[in-house]
Image (spheres, rainbow, N blue to C red):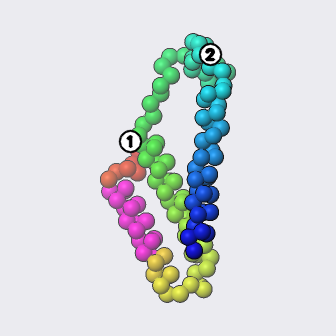
Amino acid sequence: MQNTWIFVGIFAAIAGVFPLLPIVAARFLAPSKPNTIKLDTYECGMETVGDTWVQFKVQYYIYALVFLIFDLEVAFLFPWAVAFDMLPLFAVVEGIIFILILGGGLLYAWRKGALEWS
């Protein structure tokens, strides 16, 4: 029984090392000649004017995170909703609990004022 797990361990080790090999090889083999032109900020073919570090409001990130969370949850709920009529009672209750947890998270964000635009 242990012999079969040896192959899994070898595969996991190779899977961890394999993506790192090109990065390490490029670090040692690629030419490196930095100068001020190469290190200058460049965007869309135009030279930057003014400060290049633009700070966005934190509210944009909060909206993006809330959207991302609920968007992923819809992806999790879609198969549950498609197979709703064939699910046992336990799976239906689990889905309802999941929706209630999501609703609680939305209510928490709403009460904290994270969804208000000011």
Predominant SS along the magenta part: helix
- The correct choice, above or below, for 64 with respect to 110 in the image is above
Residue closest to the eye, 16 or 5: 5
Q: Is residue 32 visible in the rendered structure shown here?
A: yes
Q: Amino acid at mark 1?
A: Ser
- The correct choice, above or below, for 20 with respect to 7 in the image is above
The residue depicted at 39 percent of the width and 61 percent of the height is 105
Which numbered disc covers residue 33? Answer: 2
Mark 1 secondary-structure assignment: loop
Point out residue 109 in the picture as x, y percentages from the top left corner.
Answer: 37, 56
Of callouts 1 and 2, the N-terminal one: 2
Q: Is residue 78 visible in the rendered structure shown here?
A: no
Residue closest to the eye, 103 or 44: 44
Point out residue 46 in the picture as x, y percentages from the top left corner.
Answer: 64, 19
Q: CA distance from mark 1 to mark 2?
A: 47 Å
At label 2, counting other C-alpha atoms closer than 10 Å, the crowd grade (few under 14, some 14-19, many 20 or more) is few
Point out residue 112 in the picture as x, y percentages from the top left corner.
Answer: 32, 53
Please identify the quarter of the rendering in which residue 29 is found: top right
Label 1 sits on residue: 118
Q: Amino acid at mark 2?
A: Lys
Instruction: Specify the segment rendered in magenta.
Output: 96-111
